[in-house]
Image (cartoon, rainbow, N blue to C red):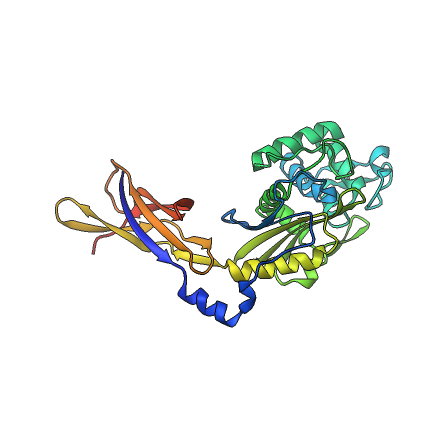
Amino acid sequence: MKALKRSFVLGFALVFVLSVFPCQSFAVSTSASASVLMDVDSGRVLYSYNADKQMGIASTTKILTALVAIQYGTLSDVVTVSQEAAYTEGSSMYLKVGEQLRLETLVYGLLLSSGNDAAVAIAQHVGGSVEAFAVLMNQMAQEIGMTNSSFANPNGLDQEGHYSTAYDMALLGAAAVNNPTLLRIASTTSITIEGHTLSNHNRLLSELDGCVGLKTGYTQACGRTLVTCVNQNGQRLVAVTLNDGNDWEDHKNLYAYGFETYPAQTLVTMGQTVAQTMLGASQTVPLVASSAFSYPAKAGETVEMTVYLDEAVALEVGVIVGRAVFTIDGVEVGQIPVRLGKSG
């Protein structure tokens, strides 16, 4: 492949911002035993502490429970609540034995009221049993890339073999906000549905602009756990804190740090000419981006773009003829296809 290089130096505008907002210059920290701040669309980790430490995650487990329910279940299904589900310990949406509710209602109770009873009812309906549902949970976790996690139940109650990491939970959070159904439910502040009035435990929905979810958690053994997502100016960040007694303020501080220090930079717009190539002996034709490319870069970082052209392609306008690869310090951070444009 032929390669054409071009560099973007992200400095002047961000340096100017730094001179106005000196808060960008100091490092953020939390009270958590483990924490991660991640950019959803790029997957870039903007802050981490003990990111790969295996820990209890309490009711943030229910993010995965909801994803499995949405993928493997039918939200319009009518679920009959078992005795086991109705009498599950801990936080509850107050289900009654024999009560019949749509699966969607149970997912609302799961994510808003953190219903352990709803989690068991969902697991029994979708998986056939709690144990079989846990198998589905672990399969989906592996698909998401949560290689350092294990799930034994759908509600996050303390149990041997049930754990995750801050990094894995950030991956889960990113997957969750890319699911429109889950995002719609998790971002609901309150709802009355099928005779149940449910209120969301996530305070940041009303306290932080752009917060769209996701889930709180607590057990005595795990402490306070929290996974949230905030969307500001089209950039989505996910924050995770595990065993954090000051989680609400820590999440606010993480987001302030992330959006100010790592704003998403649009490096290439769709249709933009990124390079030129020769067609035949004398004709110069443009190579244009097939999509936009943005990345959460901080002040002073240099993003290098290398355009790779395929060895043999049909040289027609609009045909993909290669790709533009973006790197920082030699590490790839993303790529987009490039097409043959019209010559001048």
Q: Position of residue 187 (x, y in %)?
A: 67, 54
Residue lying farthest bottom? 20
Q: Position of residue 115 (x, y in %)?
A: 78, 44
Q: How far across and down, in percent of the image, does residue 218 sit?
A: 77, 47
How many marks overall? Answer: 0
From this viewpoint, is residue 180 visible?
Answer: yes
* Closer to us: 54 or 314: 54
Task: Identify the residue shown where x is 72% and y is 34%.
Answer: 162
Side of 269 relative to 216 (left or right): left
- Relative to 5, 205 lies left or right: right
Of all residues shown, which one is farthest toward the front?
Answer: 26
Left or right, 230 with respect to 87, comes to left
Q: Position of residue 250 (x, y in %)?
A: 67, 57
Residue 184 position (above or below residue 147): below
Quadrant of residue 66 in the image? Answer: top right
Quarter of the figure that contains the C terminus: bottom left
Q: Residue at x 30, y 54 (%)?
A: 273
**Along the viewing direction, whichever of 148 and 183 lies nearer the viewer:** 148
